Image (cartoon, rainbow, N blue to C red):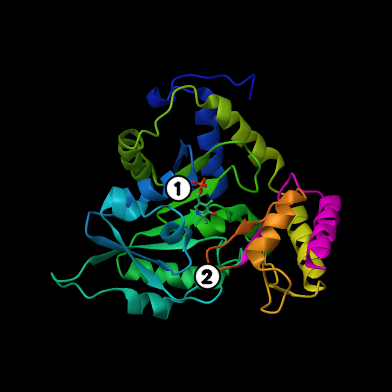
Amino acid sequence: MAEAEVGDEQLRADPTVNRLCRRVAELLGTESAMFLPTGTICNQIALRVHCEPGDEVILEETAHNRHFETGAPAALLGVSLYPVAGRAGVFTAPQLEQAVRVPDHHFPRSRVVLLEQTANLAGGTVWPIETLEEVCTAAQRLGLPRHLDGARLFNAVVASGVAADSYCRNFDSVWIDFSKGLGAPVGAALAGSAEFVERAWRFKHQFGAAMRQAGIIAAGALYALEHNIDRLTEDHENAAQLAAGLAAIEGLEVEPPATNMVFFRTVAHAPLSAYELADRLHERGVAVSRMPDGRLRAVTHLDVSHADIGRALRAVQECMS
Ligand SMILES: *Cc1c(COP(=O)(O)O)cnc(C)c1O
């Protein structure tokens, strides 16, 4: 990052950013890609390209876009969301067909279907490629653009063995986050056809996400793509080990992890509530997120070693006893 060659990203003249965008497009099998500061803005820009105010986005009820982006689709885009109740974050083509509104001037216009790979709040679960293809084929038949929130796409890739471009070819827009499991300090990339990315550039400027010497952070993202994809399997192994250890502790209820996230809660008669447990763990140097529904979430990533899992489990055991 310190040695990155830089230029003015707004003029598309930052060579490191341009190299990153070419690499992302190559990995995802798209014509083009754009560098952005965060995943949240990737979602807003993509939806802005696909939608007009008053349009409706169809997504799974646990979607990040619905819960953790401070109402941005409403606040910034004038777009409403239609949540579908899936199973483990995954819904089906018939459910999509049911969610699409008939064209009528009283109704919002169904406009985009948004899928999340992996599905974060649902437990870091993976959309099976067959279901994903069925939903995307149905969306195409219904004339709906298809958008993939791929914050953790590469976790799905290493967990399933399905290549990134096999997932991405079903979508009109896709993005990946460099600052999650891939371990870069900053950044995300939004990808799609050349025409889609060209239209997205207008909103990148409008939302204030066109940068200057962004090559400094793009260099971290390039490093992450080169070094940190295959090692995601270690995070999945660590998550499995953490979940098995937690399940053996009296008073906890643990969801079996699909990738790198372990969701758990304390049972009703446990000595501590889940949030109290989170506080005590924090004092012991173990960070877990509190979910709004009372669950806790532990995420494994490249700064958490196999030995750290043992340490974390000992800390939980101490707190619970
Ligand atoms: C983290 C996350 C986002 C938002 O990404 P940021 O880079 O934090 O803005 C969007 N969708 C999902 C599924 C996420 O996990």
**Who's the residue at 67% across and 67% down the image?**
258
**Who's the residue at 46% across and 38% down the image?**
36
The disc at residue 40 is 1
Counting from the top left corner in percent of width and height, residue 319 is at 79, 62
Position of residue 23 relative to residue 305, above or below, is above
Quadrant including the C terminus:
bottom right
Residue 299: tell me if it is visible.
no
| Mark closest to the chain's N terminus, 1 or 2 | 1
Counting from the top left corner in percent of width and height, residue 63 is at 47, 63
Counting from the top left corner in percent of width and height, residue 244 is at 80, 69
Q: Quadrant of residue 79?
A: bottom left
Q: Residue furthest left?
A: 105
Q: Which residues are magenta?
A: 295-321
Crowd band around label 2 with a 10 angstrom C-alpha radius: few (<14), some (14–19), many (20+): many
Q: Residue furthest front?
A: 271
What amino acid is labelled 2 in the image?
Answer: Gly
What amino acid is labelled 1 in the image?
Answer: Thr
Position of residue 219 relative to residue 228, above or below, is above
Q: Quadrant of residue 51?
A: bottom left
Q: Is mark 2 within 8 Å of ligand 1?
A: no
Task: Give the labeled residue for mark 2.
Answer: 89
